[in-house]
Amino acid sequence: MSTTQALLDSLLAHKSAINLASTEQKNAALVAMADQLEADCEQILQANSRDMEQAQGAIAPVMQDRLLLTAERVKAMADGIRALIALPDPVGLTLDDYQAENGLRIQKTSIPFGVIGMIYESRPNVTSDAAALAIKSGNAVILRGGKEAFHSSQAIVTALKTGLVKAGIAPEVIELVQDTSRASAQELMTAKGKIDLLVPRGGAGLIQAVVEQATVPVIETGTGICHVYVDQAADLEKALAIVANAKTSRPSVCNSAEVLLVHQDIAAQFLPLLEEKLAGQVELRADEKALAYLKQGQPAGPDDFDTEFLDYILAVKVVEHVAEAAAHIAVHSTGHSEAIVTESAETAAYFTQMVDSAAVYVNASTRFTDGGEFGLGCELGISTQKMHARGPMGLREMTTYKYIITGTGQVR
Amino acid sequence: MSTTQALLDSLLAHKSAINLASTEQKNAALVAMADQLEADCEQILQANSRDMEQAQGAIAPVMQDRLLLTAERVKAMADGIRALIALPDPVGLTLDDYQAENGLRIQKTSIPFGVIGMIYESRPNVTSDAAALAIKSGNAVILRGGKEAFHSSQAIVTALKTGLVKAGIAPEVIELVQDTSRASAQELMTAKGKIDLLVPRGGAGLIQAVVEQATVPVIETGTGICHVYVDQAADLEKALAIVANAKTSRPSVCNSAEVLLVHQDIAAQFLPLLEEKLAGQVELRADEKALAYLKQGQPAGPDDFDTEFLDYILAVKVVEHVAEAAAHIAVHSTGHSEAIVTESAETAAYFTQMVDSAAVYVNASTRFTDGGEFGLGCELGISTQKMHARGPMGLREMTTYKYIITGTGQVR
């Protein structure tokens, strides 16, 4: 048996230790996990420096920055865990409770999934976020991080397990896959009956591979070709601030904007102002109409309206009206986040109704699609599918439910 | 382009006619659809008799009975549609509405999926149930029934479309796949971006094929290896009635019981009574301990505790305690419905907590797992998966949600 299969069997044997834990037990575990992360900071940083050494020259500088841990970042991870303590327990909620016509009492109760699997890349804080969300939502969890971050993840999981032991919960409910080859990912994707929910988090390639190959239930996350539409009735100050923020505050993340749509009646006024604001920072790839209003614009290529740049590049298109904007989004969006900037309540209502994405913004930046910003604590990922969960996935999205039906001998 | 692809493209072009319809429009459509079914009863029965002729000798008598329509059954279909009218509209509900710390107003609103696909077998009433649930929940729907029922389904869909026209809704929001070959099922399973949710309903083979081959989101339905556990503290009268009902009232359906577990301290008393009650009607396939208490029992074979018999056969096993019953269920159940018969509140609580199935019964028959019995109107199917929906899937389970976030120019 592979080491990964052995871990899966061990999780199956131990999951009830967390599936059935009380709110008090789970919160005590989070306290101990957070404290232990800080107590083990030195070991975690040493492990991280081993990963960083191997990363030199092997991965891009922006990825190296994602991988790097500092004492401050370890403390932020611990604080992220502590932020979950005050949130309500999503397990054991009565979602429905009624007497059916047949006299049966039907209770619909929230319960943990059981075992959650997570396949991700090189950000070590995902390890502690996912483990903490799993514990608070009563789930056992199996984590498969990228090989670049293996030593860091290992040290973090060691600390979290020590915390569990101190809180009196079996440490076997959090496991890190030891084999970072492709084979172990494949084992998780096909662990029917052992993994109740698998969440891939990372680049588009990783997510697509998991969605296509998995036979266990998967929630698709992440890829964001996000649009900002600047309406003819936009407040231009707001529009400039929102477009600049959505594009430049953190271009490497999924909720950053990739495409700007501008109403034709405002394009002549808005686009030169935007170009000035983003000058030297963002490359504008524009369609023919937009190009006419730009000094430094590049003509957009055939793929530029279907690309998640994750970079300082913005595709720009002039549209005739909000309906054309919505139609463009329907064809080119990944269903993550879109925004309209307008002072017209009617146009805003049309846009929010017609645009079928997880998060639709009026006069705000797409960058807010985030579990923390939504008040969910941290997040497991951002769902871009419609089944089960859409948008930021917090504790509630890590539960399912069952019906408990109580009778007095009813037959049918 | 295949005829099925053409239908999928047409649905995409027309879906907003139902996705955005008001409650009044949708209810008016249901009234007209139900009335038209009754008005077209003669044509529907003629079409059904063509299917019945072809079915002679080709399919089993029990399947022929499923296929047969009568004026009474057509009226029952119409009444099934009418039962949805009074139910609340699941679309446009405010699932959450709060102000986040960043000042944004975050509204979580229920919306239809968009286009729902359904692959099913030979029961013509599934055609009208699924179409009516789709309309009430604001979804366009593409139906692919079995070839045995094609003429019946065609006549039913024709009536439903006429009803839509009379109610002023584009008839292109309900479509029946014209090609009943394997190729058309394959086209539905891989219609990414066109079908938002695919629900297979039928035998285990059909469901497994769809779950394995689909690239669109699927909800797994149906297969039920349901257990009844008779505890030492059971009321034997209730236990006899519940086991007999769960096994014999309709053995061909997924919520019928396939396995009986009996506490060892009550087996000597209960099993002979049960054998007497089921005599001549049900074959008992028993493990060694149970066999000792039965006169006519057959020794259970290796697969008998993992088989959905859908027949007058019951596997019987004696267990030492409720924990062994729960452990057996954890390994052998399909997660559909299980029941405990006991007068001990403590044992009942243990059982409902430990058993991880969609519906867990105390002192009632598993046969109640059904949308109608749960008060959901009819049902699209019974989910045996944990993601998105579990148990009977009614209107609410045919919606998803989106976040609408309103700001005053916030950036991050």
Image (cartoon, coloured by chain):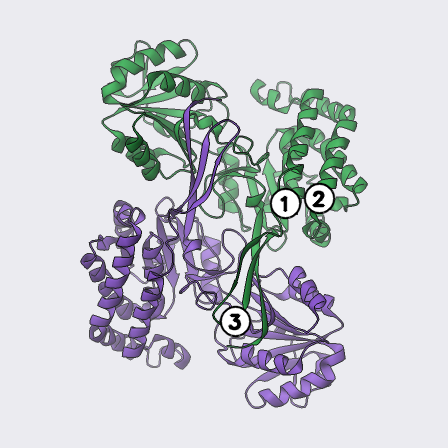
Chain colours: A purple, B green
Mark nearest the camera among 2 and 3 is 3
**Disc 3 from disc 1: Cα separation:** 31 Å
Q: Are marks 2 and 1 in contact (CB under 8 Å)?
A: yes
Count neighbours of disc 1 (C-alpha within 10 A) and say few if under 14, some if 14 to 19, many if 20 or more: some
Is A194 in front, or is A84? Answer: A84
* Element type where label 2 sits in the image: helix
Chain letter of mark 3 equals B
- The residue at the point 33 percent across, 73 percent down is A76
Name which quarter of the figure residue B193 lies in: bottom right
Is B409 in front, or is B68? Answer: B409
Amino acid type for the residue under numbered disc 1: Asp
* Residue that carries the numbered disc 1 in the rendered image: B89
Amino acid type for the residue under numbered disc 2: Lys
Q: Is residue B405 left or right of residue A141?
A: right
Q: Are marks 3 and 1 in contact (CB under 8 Å)?
A: no
Name which quarter of the figure residue B349 lies in: top left
Mark nearest the camera among 3 and 1 is 3
Q: Are marks 2 and 3 in contact (CB under 8 Å)?
A: no
* Residue that carries the numbered disc 3 in the rendered image: B103
**Which disc number belongs to residue A274?**
none
**Disc 2 from disc 3: Cα separation:** 36 Å
- Position of A65 relative to B147 (above/below): below
- Mark 3 on the same chain as mark 1: yes
* Element type where label 3 sits in the image: loop
Q: Is residue A161 left or right of residue B209?
A: left
- Position of B24 relative to B401 (above/below): above
**Which disc number belongs to residue B26?**
2
* Element type where label 1 sits in the image: loop
